[in-house]
Image (cartoon, grey):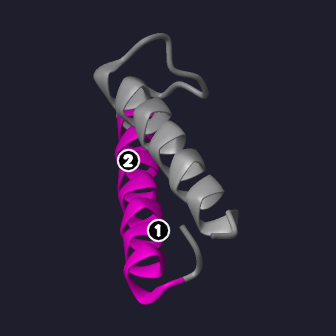
């Protein structure tokens, strides 16, 4: 992979999904009046989105 148009768009999509997941977790923490999450569905989603973005960023950095 390289920094082609498709990979850039996919990376941006993954980043946006990470932001949405982070906002959802922050909303849950605010509603529960907590500063941390202990295994909520929202924290799992955020963790998954983080891994997805990490993989996409690695693809973006690869030379082909």
Total numbered circles? 2
Looking at the rendering, the stretch of residues picked out in magenta corresponds to 4-30
Q: Residue at x 63, y 70 (%)?
A: 64
**Precedes in sequence: disc 2 or disc 1:** 1
Quarter of the image containing the N terminus?
A: bottom right
Looking at the image, which is closer to me, 24 or 7? 7
Looking at the image, which is closer to me, 63 or 41? 63
Q: Residue at x 44, y 74 (%)?
A: 7
Disc 2: which residue: 21
User: Residue 18 colored magenta?
Assistant: yes
Residue 5 at least partly seen = yes
Disc 1: which residue: 11
The percent coordinates of residue 8 (x first, y second) are 48, 79
- SS class, disc 1: helix
The percent coordinates of residue 63 (x first, y second) are 69, 69
- Crowding near pointer 2: few (<14 within 10 Å), some, many (20+)? many
Res 30 → quadrant: top left
Q: On the rendered structure, is 55 left or right of 52?
A: right
Looking at the rendered structure, which numbered label has been put on residue 22? none
- SS class, disc 2: helix
Q: Residue at x 52, y 42 (%)?
A: 50
């Amino acid at each position: 992979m390289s920094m082609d148009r498709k990979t850039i768009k996919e990376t941006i999509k993954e980043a946006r999904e990470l932001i949405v997941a982070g906002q959802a977790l922050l909303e849950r923490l605010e509603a529960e009046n907590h500063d941390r999450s202990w295994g909520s569905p929202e924290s799992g989603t955020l963790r998954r989105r983080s891994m997805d973005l990490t993989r996409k960023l690695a693809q973006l950095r690869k030379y082909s």
